[in-house]
Image (tube, grey):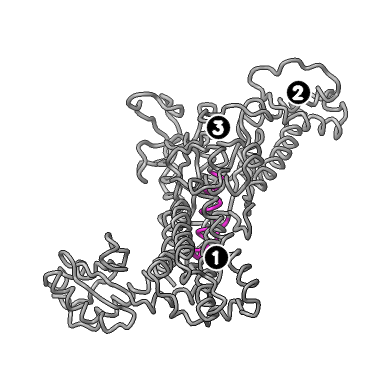
């Protein structure tokens, strides 16, 4: 139950009960009517813009329209008070009985409370991480991995049919460098002294086991082959090993993909899908041969003063048309990207989401232009840019890893502080803001550590139920019985404030899915935990407000229903972030 959606529907129904009519005789346009939290909580529980939206249509002053709507709304038994404020806003105060009914709804709904139908089952592809398969994942990949995974969770919760995809960048020159680096380790495994790793190759020790595996699989046969013969074999073998490593890294972060898509397959598969995409765009008049003017300021890497094959990306909002072929006739990276997104569209994903790193900001417009062209307006691309993560210890930024010797791996971070802390804290800021990830703070057991504060709230709900089982062993706390509890005992303002906070969850989850901003859920959970801890603390000061009263089972059952509602919403919210909801904290 989304309270705001519910009362938007009721406001619209109230308008229908009035004599309001459009001046031109047409039906009233109610599409922009909405219900939101008031700017000032003292004004009520909800506020609607209905009168402001309708005033011009009906040719009346907004306040006069608002008074007519208020007259209809006061007939609603769940509305305790309806007031007109300012130029014509309507503030609503809901009855305590309505708020208590929210607890029952949450207990009955369980983990489905807040689940929506925004997506209406539409297919959507979320592509994230997509790190080059040249080594273990480092901390720079972590934020994008968590962001993409949480967005996919939110979209699924909002009713979309979600595909989680990883794009393996295995077609560029870097994988040839990787293969040559692995071949050097292969020679080392055969007993050859290789000395210092030459400049330009990957020096990481993570390639030592790959070299050993090559030696075990092929003996010294590759030494007798030419580079032209061994390079494709070693390249494929090494990419497979790197992807095994990356999948393990992702598993440590509780990140799972449905599809791992090879960039190399676009060109070296059953047919050349890059050519197919370019031919398709050519047939639509979106590809031409021409020259590009020199851009102002610094020249981009893909600008060349020559006639070349260009995509008309300016027709779709880009700043300049983009090259599809390099001077040697090979495809540009952008051409491969067009083919990849075209392939996703042909697989049924008109709606696509890409999670990109901070260094890809200048790539967004051309990608969005490409998807607009290949979907012919039937779909679109949302791009989320992840800013950097600074790892901090004792106020100092970390730059080295004792495991890899040259960068901090994802595994280093997860093994030190745990998957939950990493995932929650990566989502505790907007994706476009740089994060300072402090090892000391994310393991601190205090309110200043958001993940601890939220998980502790859930653990506290579990401890309340354990205490109830001890003090009132015959009291049923089964979901069905809690849902039937007499909730009239929930009347203290801190309890009602907690219920109001719980009621916001469906709106928060839907908004986070629509905007693809998981940080909204993290912020909400921190606030909710604060409300719950406040009720707990007030019970310590005022015994009559404690959750368990062995002398009043009716009261206890009502408050346990509220505790169950809190546990449900926290657990569901944490699951959207891929974080566990512990029963105990040690």
Mark whose residue sits in front, 2 or 1: 1
Residue at image position (51%, 27%) is 327
**Side of 104 where 296 appears, left or right:** left
Within 10 angstroms of label 2, few (less than 14), some, or many (20 or more) residues? many
Give the percent coordinates (x, y) of residue 508: 43, 60
Residue 422 seen in the current view: yes
- Which residue carries the number 2 mark? 184
Judge whether 461 appears above or below 344 on screen. Answer: below
Q: Secondary structure at mark 3?
A: strand
Q: Secondary structure at mark 2?
A: helix
- Which residue carries the number 1 mark? 567
Work out whether residue 102 or residue 385 is closer to the camera in this orientation and state it: 102
Query: Where does the magenta region start and end?
Result: 144-163
- Which residue carries the number 3 mark? 393
Q: Are marks 2 and 3 in contact (CB under 8 Å)?
A: no
Distance from Cα at disc 1 to Cα at disc 3:
33 Å
């Amino acid at each position: 139950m989304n309270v705001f959606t519910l009362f938007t529907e009721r406001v619209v129904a109230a308008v229908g009960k009035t004599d309001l009519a459009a001046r031109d005789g047409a039906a009233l346009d109610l599409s922009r009517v909405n219900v939101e939290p008031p700017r000032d909580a003292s004004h009520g529980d909800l506020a609607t813009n209905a009168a402001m939206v309708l005033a011009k249509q009906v040719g009346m002053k907004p306040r006069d329209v608002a008074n007519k709507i208020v007259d209809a709304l006061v007939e609603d038994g769940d509305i305790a008070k309806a007031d007109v404020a300012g130029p014509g806003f309507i503030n609503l105060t809901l009855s305590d009985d309505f708020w208590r009914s929210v607890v029952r709804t949450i207990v009955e709904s369980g983990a489905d409370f807040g689940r929506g139908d925004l997506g209406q089952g539409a297919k959507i592809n979320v592509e994230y991480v997509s790190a080059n398969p040249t080594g273990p994942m480092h901390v720079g990949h972590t934020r994008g991995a968590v962001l993409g995974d949480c967005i996919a969770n939110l979209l699924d919760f909002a009713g979309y049919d979600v595909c989680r995809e990883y794009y393996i960048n295995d077609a560029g020159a870097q994988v040839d460098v990787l293969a040559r680096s692995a071949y050097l380790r292969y020679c080392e495994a055969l007993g050859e002294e290789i000395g210092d790793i030459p400049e330009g190759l990957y020096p990481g020790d993570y390639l030592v086991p790959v070299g050993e595996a090559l030696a075990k699989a092929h003996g010294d046969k590759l030494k007798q082959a030419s580079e032209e013969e061994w390079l494709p074999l070693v390249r494929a073998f090494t990419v497979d090993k790197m992807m095994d490593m990356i999948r393990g890294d992702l598993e440590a972060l509780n990140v799972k993909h449905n599809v791992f898509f090879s960039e190399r397959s676009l060109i070296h598969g059953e047919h050349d899908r890059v050519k197919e995409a370019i031919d398709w765009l050519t047939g639509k008049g979106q590809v031409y041969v021409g020259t590009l003017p020199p851009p102002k300021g610094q020249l981009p890497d893909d600008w060349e003063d020559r006639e070349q094959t260009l995509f008309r990306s300016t027709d779709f909002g880009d700043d300049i048309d983009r090259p599809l072929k390099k001077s040697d006739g090979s495809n540009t990276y952008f051409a491969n990207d067009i083919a990849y997104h075209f392939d996703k569209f042909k697989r049924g994903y008109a709606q696509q989401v890409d999670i990109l790193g901070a260094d890809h900001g200048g790539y967004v417009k051309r990608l969005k232009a490409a998807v607009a062209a290949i979907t012919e307006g039937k779909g679109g691309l949302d791009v989320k840019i992840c800013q950097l993560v600074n790892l901090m210890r004792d106020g100092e930024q970390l730059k080295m890893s004792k495991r890899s010797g040259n960068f901090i791996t994802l595994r280093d971070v997860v093994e030190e502080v745990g998957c939950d802390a990493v995932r929650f804290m990566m989502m505790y800021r907007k994706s476009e803001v740089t994060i300072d990830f402090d090892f000391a703070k994310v393991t601190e057991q205090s309110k200043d550590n958001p993940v601890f504060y939220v998980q502790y709230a859930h653990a506290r709900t579990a401890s309340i139920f354990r205490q109830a089982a001890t003090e009132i062993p015959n009291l049923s706390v089964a979901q069905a019985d809690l849902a039937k509890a007499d909730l009239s005992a929930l009347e203290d303002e801190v309890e009602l404030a907690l219920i109001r906070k719980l009621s916001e969850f469906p709106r928060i989850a839907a908004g986070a899915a629509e905007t693809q901003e998981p940080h909204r859920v993290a912020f909400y959970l921190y606030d909710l935990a604060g409300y719950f801890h406040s009720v707990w603390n007030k019970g310590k000061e005022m015994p009559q407000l404690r959750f368990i009263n062995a002398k009043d089972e009716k009261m206890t059952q009502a408050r346990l229903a509220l505790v169950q509602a809190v546990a449900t919403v926290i657990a569901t919210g944490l699951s959207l972030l891929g974080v566990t909801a512990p029963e105990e904290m040690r």
